[in-house]
Amino acid sequence: MIVVKRAELIFICFMLLHGFAATLNCRKATPESLFAELEKNVFPKNLLRPVNNFSTPTIVTIGITVVGIIGVDEKSQTLTTLLWQVLEWDIEGLSWDEKECGTKRVSVPREKLWVPDVFITQFTDEDKSPKTPYVYIFNTGRVYDDTPIRVVSSCRLEIYTFPFDIQNCSLTFGSYLHFDTEIRMMHSSTSEEILAESHNVLETNGEWVLAGITVASSNLTLNLGSYSEVEYHIILRRRATLYVVNLLIPSCFLITVDLFSFMLPPHSVDRSSFKMTLILGYTVFLLIMNDLLPVTGETTPLINVFFSISLALMVASLLETVFITNIQYRSCPDRAVPHWLSVLVLQYLAVVVCLPREENSSRSSIFLNPSATKGQNSRIPNVPGFHLECLPGDAAPTEPGLDELRKVSRDLLAIRLRVEQHFQGGQSRQEWQMVGRVIDRLLFGFYVVFITFSFVTIACIWTWSNSYAS
Ligand SMILES: *[C@@H]1O[C@H](CO)[C@@H](O)[C@H](O)[C@H]1NC(C)=O
């Protein structure tokens, strides 16, 4: 009896010592004998979590390396990456002697072993990467499972500062079913190591630069229990060169041309048609470049605001030209400039915009001269007119000649009136033109100030948002 009990005790002790699997005793140092041992001790238990006790959690260590950033889809808000995922866990009690079995590690088909059900929470599409059929078992009982995975994960994309945007996408690895009492997740390397290794192997990254990776373990607690998770944050920065060259620089060129078109005289039709052509060109440019812009309903990217402002500025400057042309070429130029307008514009605003009055007065004085001497002039025709009137009284030798003279006098009078009127009109037209020039210069000033202000603001937001220090 005692002997039997002792034998049982020894057996139990043996079981406790060796745990879930036993130490393998290879008969020869060949793959066949190792495999035979594994087939006997390990493979039949591939449906069980490799622990002795239910209360022992399996610790799964995860390591990822970012191999490729395939793309970011703003419309469906997804990030597609190619990762190398390494999972490691222990088969409790399994071990063999390296010399006895002839190897330190052996690869076995994945189906022959229990593997943890590690998923990525953000998966939105099935993993289409090729499946690797094997995993390594080490002589310490450690299982090493290295697979490539193509992850299409949902990611909240912030495109407000496009094309200078930085995206922060999370990948959360954890068991789908097992609570943290069964599977506990750990990360194998630090953020810096992952980043350095990823930079070493990163091949396809398209328009994205891997700016940083951070890793942290976390717990997700739900009603039934809590899940152990490892959370990675992948920080991506967009390469903006393409967009700067294709979108921003041409846009700035067009705005600059629009700015310089203020140098054209507004009264010539050239300026308005020039600006019209610019607007047309800009519209076509926007239509062509529309494909480059991200499409999403959530936020409007700042670059769209930039384009809108540019277009609005062009339209505003065209309207300004129409307005100025209207002022300078009014339908009734004979109407003099109202006094208040003349004072406001020609005396005050002209000083503000540095358009000196002297030039105006000296020029208008040429035209003013005839009207200034109008008083004298008007008397002169009167005298000959009177003279002519008097002539018949003195003597009327040549009646037909006198009539001729009278007619000529009347004609002259009419011509003089017309000329006077013309000069007067010319003067008020001159004044209107001056008013137009002053207002033109003033609005140009506003235009420049507004452009500078809005563009500097936008540039500041872009610079500020792009200054992520990894
Ligand atoms: C990325 O987002 C997570 C939250 O989703 C945040 O904890 C983390 O600090 C962010 N990383 C950076 C660099 O902004």
Image: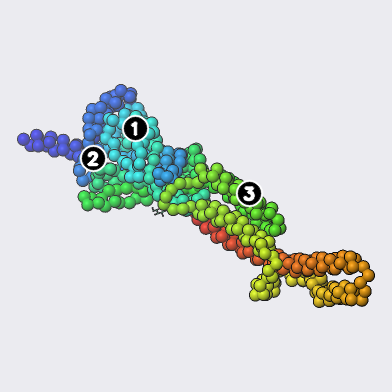
Find the distance from the CA under tag 3 to the CA under tag 1: 67 Å
User: As rendered, which of 86 and 89 lies closer to the eye?
Assistant: 86
The amino acid type, in three-letter code, at marker 1 is Val
Find the distance from the CA under tag 2 to the CA under tag 3: 78 Å
- Residue 217 location (% of width, % of height): 34, 50
User: As rendered, which of 381 and 131 lies closer to the eye?
Assistant: 381
The amino acid type, in three-letter code, at marker 3 is Thr
Of badges 3 and 1, nearer the viewer stands 3
Tell me if I can see residue 333 in this picture.
yes
The label shown at residue 51 is 2
Relative to residue 135, is residue 73 drawn left or right?
A: right
Tell me if I can see residue 232 in this picture.
no
Q: Which residue is tagged 3?
A: 277
Asked if the residue at tag 3 contacts the one at tag 2, i.e. Cβ–Cβ closer than 8 Å, the answer is no
Q: Which residue is tagged 1?
A: 135
Relative to residue 330, is residue 90 drawn left or right?
A: left
User: As rendered, which of 41 and 89 lies closer to the eye?
Assistant: 89
Above or below, 371 relative to 287: below
Above or below, 139 relative to 467: above
Q: Residue at x 41, y 52 (%)?
A: 298
Asked if the residue at tag 2 contacts the one at tag 1, i.e. Cβ–Cβ closer than 8 Å, the answer is no
Q: Would you identify the image quadrant in which residue 393 lies?
A: bottom right
Q: Secondary structure at mark 2?
A: loop
Find the distance from the CA under tag 1 to the CA under tag 2: 19 Å
The amino acid type, in three-letter code, at marker 2 is Val
